[in-house]
Image (tube, helix red, strand yellow):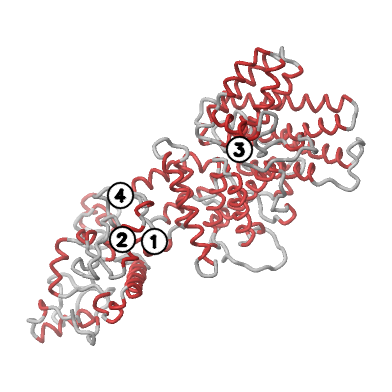
Amino acid sequence: MSSSNTSPDTYSNPTFDSVNASSAGQSTHKRRRSTDDPISPKGDNTGSGTPSLKRIACVICRKRKLKCDGSKPSCSTCKRLHHDCAYDEVRRKSGPKRGYVKALEERLKQVEELLKTRDPSAAKSPDLARPSFTAANTHTSSRGMLATANADFGVNNPDIVVVNDRDHERWHYPGDSPQPGMEELAFDPNLNMGGMTMDPTFTWEMIGLGLDEPLPPQDTIDELHQIYFEKIHPSVPMIHKYRYLAAMNLAPNQRPPVCLRYAMWTLACSVTDKYLDLKDHFYQRSRKYVEQDYLKGHGEHLISVGHAQTHILLGNYEFKMMYFPRAWMSTGSGIRLCQMMGLHRLDGAGLDVKQCLPPARDWTEREERRRTFWMAFAGDRYASIGTGWPMTIDERDVLTNLPASEEAFEKSKPEQTTSLSDAFKPEGAKAITAFGTIVFMAALFGRNLVHLHRPDANELDSDLNGEFWKRHKQLDNILLNTSLNLPDHLKMPEGIHSPNIVYANMNMHTSTICLHQAAVYKADKNHLPASMSKESKMRCINSANEIAGIMRMISHMDLSAMNPFISFCLYVAARVFVQYLKSRPEDNRTGDALRFLLAAMNAMKAKNPLTESFLVQLDVDLESLGLRDPKYKALINGHLNNPQAHIYKTHHGNGTDPCNFMKIVETVDTSAQPSPPT
């Protein structure tokens, strides 16, 4: 290598030392010429020495890779084959894409800085921290840089030994897996930095992205992405598939956050047997990397749509796996991130507040932000109706329109949508989309929760003209109008192939049951006319039958693609059947419907463990039903053999409800002490 006072542009090469002065001058002249200057073809120089213009092949010859004589207006090849000859006068730029070299330089700089901080001797000798390109090492280029994967990198400080420090959580690659990060950096394999031998599976992308372990193999990543967008995305449609996959091919610092990728892979693993054992591993990594982003700098690294999507996906997975306290916190973090970035006011004018995100580049990016917010909004409502705890988002603060159709989002076709407040108008349901129905029903669940848990001073639930019954009738009218005005493609069975349409229709009947069970409770408590209670009970049993009918329609489909909260709808319907059979045990049709729902829930719990908590909550009602009618004992005994139910009964006893999550809170005795979610 040249001495320290030699400029990098003046590295000597023995190959060029024997060239005479005139040749050197000529080569210098050629180097000064711009790459866009025309270069004369062989034998075309004129006597004056002025080069002629470079011959450009026509479009057809270039495309078919044929020899073209460049004759205009039509070349000889096109004349002979009777083609329409045309020339593209714009020269195509060659070489790497914009920003590629700069990204490599930044990564090289990070590696050099890391080595300087770890090894004091490297800072004194710059040559040790810089790759050597002298003539003695030029022979390595003929063999490629594959040998760099086994390079001997070392420092004197044993704390940097990657192999020994993180063996307990490393992803072990096969020995022949590619090493793209090492090949791009192109380090000298003979470089000695203290005697430490690097693991051949180490990828230098870890340094650029702040990773503690290598990512999974590329074929595994591709398969998990395919599983995610086939089975998870339909019920959580907030990430633009094609832009996400295109971003995965960008420079490492421009790719989606690592925590988001691991969150997506976690959900994908949870619905496939092949990778089921990796779901907990990927889940822990996702939480670890999102926490690391929290601690970088002043926390500014977490202000991105990708990190909000990470929290939403983690909350979805945690609800699914019954990690209820974590799910509550993850959902809240996603909501606060969305509010911090102003995603709740994308389509309306409000007071000027601090802007943490630059404006969206186009409609597609704006739509992805809308969908991210609405997924956080739906998660907020589901978490609150399951616990009775307050909601975070106030509808009056929302100035973001409902999401557009899936086709418009995927194809980046701008589409005008309505607001949430307009959707609640009598004919507002005609303008909403499949994802919009999910948002609409989540908002209706939230209004039902406010109706039950935020009474007015003049509530007067004992008076049929009081505020409670006025709100009840208003919410019931919204449900009836929505059911009447909903477009046919958003109803069953037309929408059977869309998980969101299936879930929205189940939600509509579930919301009806929750509303009218509260009415039954209030009517019986205040000794109101029996007709009030009778009408609400009929509405409940009819809605429960509708839910069972929808479940029969989709029983042949892959239920892992459905929203995890679909098990709540089945639980509500099954609970209505249990209550109905207590007074009419001879109704065989209702008994068959109950057996079918319990069988469906037992089948779902393998891929959706959240269903287990609802089965355990049904246990108390099923026991009392078995005591009243012996013919249901076989069904109950099969359920009591469930190991999870036995665990819950051991800790909570036979007479108490084992899990307060997603309990129909309006039917709980207020004198009892509620238990927190498990």
Q: CA distance from mark 1 to mark 3?
A: 35 Å
Question: Where's residue 359, x and y in %?
Answer: 58, 64
Q: Which mark is residue 565?
A: 3
Look at label 4 and name its amino acid: Tyr
- Residue at numbered disc 4: 173
Disc 3 crowd, CA 10 A, few/some/many (<14, 14-19, 20+): some
Q: CA distance from mark 4 to mark 1?
A: 20 Å
First in residue order: circle 3 vs circle 4: 4
Q: Are marks 1 and 3 in contact (CB under 8 Å)?
A: no
Q: Closer to the observer: label 3 or label 4? A: 4
Disc 2 crowd, CA 10 A, few/some/many (<14, 14-19, 20+): some
Residue 136 can be seen, yes or no: yes
Look at label 2 and name its amino acid: Gly
Q: CA distance from mark 4 to mark 2?
A: 15 Å
Regarding mark 2 in the picture, which secondary structure is present there? helix
Q: Which mark is residue 478?
A: none
Q: Is residue 257 left or right of residue 544?
A: left
Regarding mark 4 in the picture, which secondary structure is present there? loop
Q: CA distance from mark 2 to mark 3?
A: 41 Å
Q: Which mark is residue 252?
A: 1
Q: Closer to the observer: label 4 or label 1? A: 4
Q: Are marks 1 and 2 in contact (CB under 8 Å)?
A: yes
First in residue order: circle 4 vs circle 2: 4
Q: Is residue 178 left or right of residue 425?
A: left
Question: Where's residue 180, x and y in %?
Answer: 29, 58
Look at label 3 and name its amino acid: Phe
Q: Quadrant of residue 36?
A: bottom left
